[in-house]
Amino acid sequence: MADIGFIGLGNMGGPMAKNLVQAGHGVKGFDVGAAAIETARANGVEIVGSAAEAKGPVVFTMLPAGEHVRDVYLGDDGIIAAADPATLFIDSSTIDVGTCREVHAAARAAGHSMLDAPVSGGVAGADGGTLTFMVGGDQADFAKASPLFEIMGRTVVLAGGPGNGQAAKVCNNMILGISMIAVAEAFSLAEKLGLEAQSLFDISSKASGSCWAMLNHNPVPGLVETSAANRDYKPGFAAAMMHKDMKLSQAAAAQVGAATPLGAQAAALYTLFVNAGNSDVDYSGIIKMIKGE
């Protein structure tokens, strides 16, 4: 099988690259972090000396923010200029829609193809190959990339044209951020009213209050096996990441003139939570702030 380039081998990119290697692909990887490099090398990734050297017919990027994506793709030593002809770029970072569409356009102007393919599922999903990919781009490019997505994920959806993967991700995570605050408020209120958390869960999980955040990341310890609350809120999805996504949702809303009053309030609450020193706490730990702890 042909080599795949993979730029960004951290908490998400590293496990994704590992799964590609385990499926029989050669992966040429690059990262700026020594620990990420050593882990990736141990997982069979061929480490190269620069992002421009992480070449192949398909090149993935998984980077922290829009400015990093812009620099890696469009900078003086950017991968668009260095790429082999007709490379398919796949950016799985979570970034702003504007930057995403800018990079799409630059890649196509240089004769390459591109998909934006942000993911949901966290580090556990990346490691287990159960991510959800929300993809923006052309149908033909999506068909070409789908076998690779299926190695790393369980659900793969083409959301539409360039940037629509990012649009889907920001809307989805705005729902999640708002939902978690609602669940935290409800369980905090129940406690003050003398209603046991287990009783509320048994009722609401089967009633109209049920939602994904309650069923999978419940902020009360002992109710849901998969919850970070059972591990003293050690992050599966860090508050800093939710804060980033909520800010992206509000930037997108401002850009298109959409009213998102609950999204704005949730973003403000996550700002308070993160600024109080909780960046590395799971996002469900916001229940502590709501309870005044």
Image: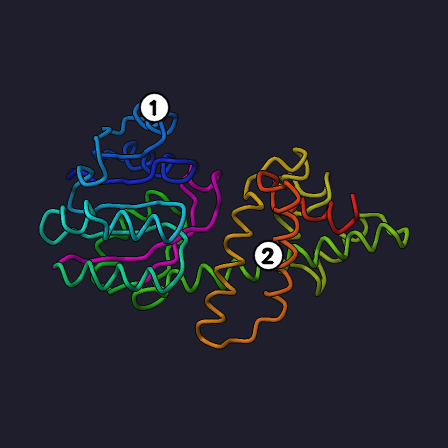
Tell me residue 54's x, y (percent): 20, 38
Q: Where 254 sits versus 80, above or below? A: below
Image mark for residue 177: 2
Near mark 2 (Cα within 10 A), the count class, few <14, some 14-19 or many ≥20, is: many
Label 2 SS: helix
Q: Nearer the viewer, residue 92 or 96?
A: 96
Q: Where 62 sits versus 101, above or below? A: above
Tell me residue 214's x, y (percent): 66, 52
Image mark for residue 16: none
Q: Amino acid at mark 1?
A: Glu
Q: Amino acid at mark 2?
A: Gly
In percent of the image, x 67 and y 59: which residue is there? 210
User: Residue 192 lies in magenta, yes or no?
Assistant: no
Label 1 SS: helix
Q: Nearer the viewer, residue 216 or 47?
A: 47
Tell me residue 209's x, y (percent): 71, 62
Residue farthest to the front, as pictured: 76
Question: Is 258 on the left or on the right of 153, as rendered?
Answer: right
Q: Nearer the viewer, residue 188 or 210?
A: 188
User: Residue 133 lies in magenta, yes or no?
Assistant: yes
In percent of the image, x 85 and y 50: which residue is there? 191
In percent of the image, x 43 and y 44: which residue is there? 130
> Where does the magenta region start and end?
111-136
Question: Is 268 on the left or on the right of 242, as rendered?
Answer: right
- Inter-mark Cα distance, 1 to 2: 34 Å
Quarter in which the C terminus is drawn: top right
Image mark for residue 38: 1
Tell me residue 116's x, y (percent): 32, 57
- Quadrant of the rendered structure where residue 232 is? top right
